[in-house]
Structure formats: structure tokens, C-alpha cells
Image (cartoon, rainbow, N blue to C red):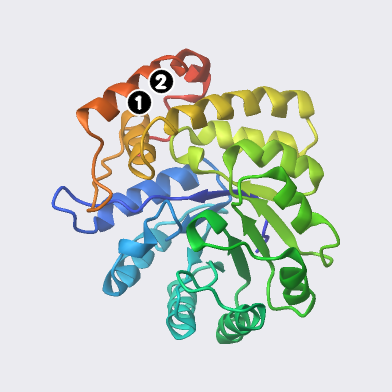
Amino acid sequence: MTIDGLVVPVPTLFSEDGELDRAANARFGRSLCEASVDHLFLLGSLGEFTIVEDAERAALLESVIETIVGRTDAWVGCGSPSPARSVRYARAAEEAGAAAVVAVPPYYLRPTEAEIAQYYRAIHESVRIPLLAYNIPSMVGYALSPSLLHRLGAEGTLAGVKDTAGAIESVSAFLTDAPPGWAVLPGNDVLAVEAIRRGAVGAVMGMANIVPRLAVELVRAARSHDQARADALHALVVALAAVAATGPFPSTDKYLAQKVRGVAVGYRHPYGPLTEEERARVDRAWAGVEERLRPFLGEHRA
């Protein structure tokens, strides 16, 4: 497998009563495969991994991974505050057919760098598939240091990092002096083009759940050094991301996927559906960009 290209952090879909909807998740994953995305990232932040029960993880992975077609593969989030639990998640992901695992460092209580290194080594040693770190300080409570991750990359523990710190300077720090073959992927959609220009091997883009063709074409243009095309598509991604930002995460992303692509999403407390006021605000924002996005709409409905 290759750790590059477009990675889509897919939402976890629920039924009207808040139960995991295996069929809906399978259809949604399949639709992204048909849109030619490179990787599906299951059980990340947009996948609401913190509210998916352990017993549900296997059902979710099985339903999605078994329906993957084409060259798309699946990456699975396995991070938790407990190293033993993360090892268990990673092994289960590999057994389900995941091509890679992605792990946030232990959160809530802050471990030392030595303990973080031990955490990643334990996960790496438990599986044969690549492991990527997930830097998201706004959720974890602290940032992973480039020097630590580079050391873990040089020793073969980490294959790369998904960086969702929200700043191009953070992406650049992970690119600078990185070990050979080490992958850096920005997790903020609006940084995708600039990050690839600086050396990132691809991008993780949540907006691909709403307008997949736009994200596919943007990453392809950026990686092929078609800067004029990449910059034009970047402007559309910025506009779409602004629409998503008018409501709460992750419910707004789900609502837009339903509105634009006909996805039956479903919600689970405490991340419920948008209020009437929130829907109206998001709808107004969408109306302002819909015409610009029309060339990318109408395909790959789930």
C-alpha cells in the first residue's frame, strides 16, 4: 500500500434511534470508493470514535471494509488514553482488513515524551501494518513534537503523521528534517494545497464527504504540480469549509452530506441533529456557494 493521496475521514452513520447503521455505513464507504478516493479513515474525529462502543467497532469495520472496491483501502483510528486498549483496537483493525492504523496520543492526562514513545512502540509492535501518529492538540490537550515523531519514524515505529494542528507552520515543522520515506498529511482541508506544495504526500479532507469530486481533483492537481488548477480548487474548498464552520462539528458535516449527497446520516447523543436555527444558518451559507460548486455535484450519491 501507499501512504499518500486523498484520505477521507468518514463519519459514522447511525439509525434514527441512534444505533449503528451497518448498511448505511457500507453504502457511504462504497460511494467514496466509486469517487476514487485513496483511503477511507474510519473512527477518527469525524467518525465520533469516542462514542462508538467497543462492541460496535468490529461491526462497523466489517461492514465498510468488506464493501470497499477499486484501489481504495481503509485506515482505522485506534488511539485511546490506554495503551492496552489501543493495542487491542489496532489488532482488531488489522484482523478486519485495515491497511493502516492511526493513533492520537493518550489524552486527558498528559504523559511524558518517553511514555508517548512507549505508547507508539507498543501499538507498532502489535501489528504488521503501518502506524501513523495523529497530532490534534485542540482535542488531545497537547501537541506532539516533530523531533519525537521523527525519532520514532527513523526507528521504524511510525510511518508518518496526520497533523491537525490547524497551522501550516506545524505541517512544515513535521516536514523539516523528517526521515526518508516518512509521510506527512495535513488534517485541515484549507491547508491541503500549500502543505502538498511544501512536501506533504497528500491530505486528509473532511469536505470530501460532502463534495468528493472536488477533493479528489484538488489533491490530484496539487500532487501533479498543476498549481493554477490547485489554487482554483483551493478557493472552492475554503468556501465549502466556511459553510461547514457555520454549525457545530461533526453534526454540520453530516447534515451537509445528507443535504448535498442524499446520505441518510443519523445522529447519536451528545452530537445530535442541528437545531432549526442552525439548519437555517447552514442553508443560507450553502446557498451562497452552491452555484460555484455545481460542476462537482450530482455524482457519487450514497
Q: Residue at x 22, y 33 (%)?
A: 275
Quadrant in which the N terminus is drawn: bottom right
Q: Residue at x 50, y 36 (%)?
A: 212
Instruction: Check if mark 2's residue and mark 1's residue have beta carbons within 8 Å.
Output: yes
Q: Which mark is residue 285?
A: 2
Left or right of 134? Residue 50 is left
Asked where in the image residue 65 lies, by quadrant, the reply is bottom left
Q: Residue at x 62, y 62 (%)?
A: 143
Quadrant in which the C terminus is drawn: top left
Q: Amino acid at mark 1?
A: Val
Q: Secondary structure at mark 2?
A: helix
Q: Is residue 201 visible?
A: no
Answer few, some or many: residues within 10 Å of disc 1's Cα (few below 14, many 20 plus, some between 14 and 19). many
Q: Amino acid at mark 2?
A: Ala
Q: Nearer the viewer, residue 249 or 217?
A: 249
Q: Nearer the viewer, residue 228 or 86?
A: 86
Q: Residue at x 55, y 45 (%)?
A: 37
Answer few, some or many: residues within 10 Å of disc 2's Cα (few below 14, many 20 plus, some between 14 and 19). some
Q: Secondary structure at mark 1?
A: helix
Left or right of 143? Residue 276 is left
Left or right of 169? Residue 261 is left
Q: CA distance from mark 2 to mark 1?
A: 5 Å
Q: Position of residue 11 (x, y in %)?
A: 38, 50
Asked where in the image residue 288 lies, by quadrant, the reply is top left
Q: Nearer the viewer, residue 98 or 45?
A: 45
Q: Position of residue 286 (x, y in %)?
A: 40, 21
View extreme (left): residue = 17
Residue tagged 1: 282
